[in-house]
Amino acid sequence: MDSSEFRKRGKEMVDYIADYMETLSVRKVTAQVEPGYLRRLLPNKAPYRGETWEAIMKDVDNAILPGITHWQHPNFHAYFPSGNSYPSIIGDMLSDAIGCVGFSWV
């Protein structure tokens, strides 16, 4: 991935995240699958070449999200929702881009 594709996919990801956050209330709060469901959906070996962005995002929607408990869902009351506001997500993006170890003294 070069910087041009990074810009494109980054913008797509921001849209994906915003769409996810806006549709939380219509999703099921907890996982709708049995433990271990993902094993049968994964290949036995890692692919030799990476998959397309579209294939990866399809896997996120069809394989990963069904197994998620949506902690930011308005009907999830087990924990106080924090650390997932839009400003927090943008802050994480910047922190990840800088990529420094937070405990380094040098």
Image (spheres, grey):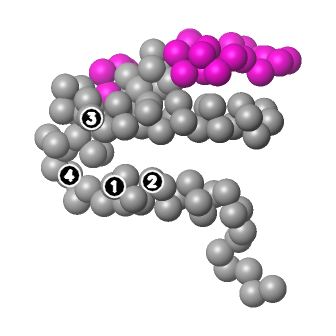
Q: Earlier in the sequence, mark 2 or mark 4?
A: 4
Highlighted range, magenta? 31-59
Residue designated by label 4: 78
Q: Nearer the viewer, residue 76 or 88?
A: 88
Residue designated by label 3: 22
Residue designated by label 2: 89
Q: Nearer the viewer, residue 21 or 32?
A: 21
Distance from the alpha carbon under mark 3 to that under mark 1: 12 Å
Q: Earlier in the sequence, mark 1 or mark 4?
A: 4
Distance from the alpha carbon under mark 2 to that under mark 1: 6 Å
The amino acid type, in three-letter code, at marker 4 is: Ala
Mark toward the viewer: 2 or 4 = 2
The amino acid type, in three-letter code, at marker 1 is: Ser
Name above or below for residue 42 compared with residue 99. Answer: above
The amino acid type, in three-letter code, at marker 3 is: Glu
* Residue positioned most to the bottom: 105
Q: Nearer the viewer, residue 90 or 59?
A: 90
Q: Main secondary structure of the magenta part?
A: loop
Q: Which mark is residue 85?
A: 1
Q: Secondary structure at mark 3?
A: helix
- Number of numbered discs overlaid on the protein picture: 4
Looking at the picture, how far across and down is residue 63, in whole percent? 48, 19
Distance from the alpha carbon under mark 3 to that under mark 4: 20 Å
Looking at the picture, how far across and down is residue 79, in whole percent? 24, 56
Mark toward the viewer: 1 or 4 = 1
Q: Residues within 10 Å of mark 2 (few under 14, many from 20)?
A: some
